[in-house]
Image (cartoon, rainbow, N blue to C red):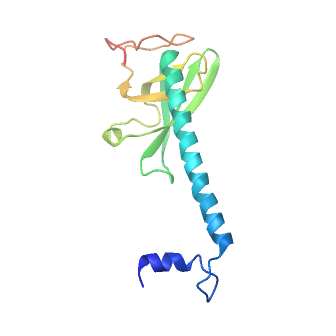
Amino acid sequence: MTLWDDLMQNFWKDGTREWHKGKIISSIVVVLALIVFAFYNSRRLKANAADRKANLKYTIGVTGKTHHNIKSSQPTVEFTYNVGMTEYSGNEMIAAQFEKSVVANGGRYYVEFSSKNPNNSKLLLDYPVPDTVTNTQEEGWTYMPGYNNKR
């Protein structure tokens, strides 16, 4: 029996070669739901990136614990940052090139965020904060101190 035959047997009524409409419809609904979720998530991520780019500010983020996430093979790192009097937190995937170099539990990296929605942020693991930069502006910077040009 081929893989295709095995798969098709799951959609037949037991002991017959008659299609089980309930199984077919429920399978189609599940596949469509996954496609809709992937499309929505992709649009949300693009909208967040566009918002950050349009209202770009920088601040200092401090890393916390790292986690190996079930959803992805890439580990993530927790981080916190302050804008005004509010502390925000987030998680950032650690790309392969940073896995060995990222400083967890106290590493300082620049965070780009949207000035209109400071919760919309991204930890910039390729931009560690130089030791010469000790404090932040309350509402963030329009550039990254210690680096000659913006990202």
The structure residue drawn at horizontal position 35% and vertical position 13%, both measured from the top left corner, is 146
Q: Is residue 7 above or below residue 97?
A: below
Q: Nearer the viewer, residue 128 or 74?
A: 74
Residue 138 drawn at (x, y percent): 57, 11
Instruction: Count all numbered tags in the image, as a single digit.
Output: 0
Residue 10 drawn at (x, y percent): 57, 77
Image quadrant in which the C terminus is located: top left
The structure residue drawn at horizontal position 48% and vertical position 33%, both measured from the top left corner, is 63
The structure residue drawn at horizontal position 47% and vertical position 19%, both measured from the top left corner, is 53
Image quadrant in which the N terminus is located: bottom left
The structure residue drawn at horizontal position 31% and vertical position 39%, both measured from the top left corner, is 97
In the displayed orientation, state which residue is furthest to the front: 18
Q: Is residue 96 above or below residue 51?
A: below
Determine which quarter of the picture holds residue 17. bottom right
Q: Is residue 151 left or right of residue 122?
A: left
Q: Is residue 104 left or right of residue 33?
A: left
Q: Nearer the viewer, residue 77 or 103?
A: 77
In the displayed orientation, state which residue is furthest to the bottom: 15
Determine which quarter of the picture holds residue 13. bottom right
Residue 95 drawn at (x, y percent): 37, 40
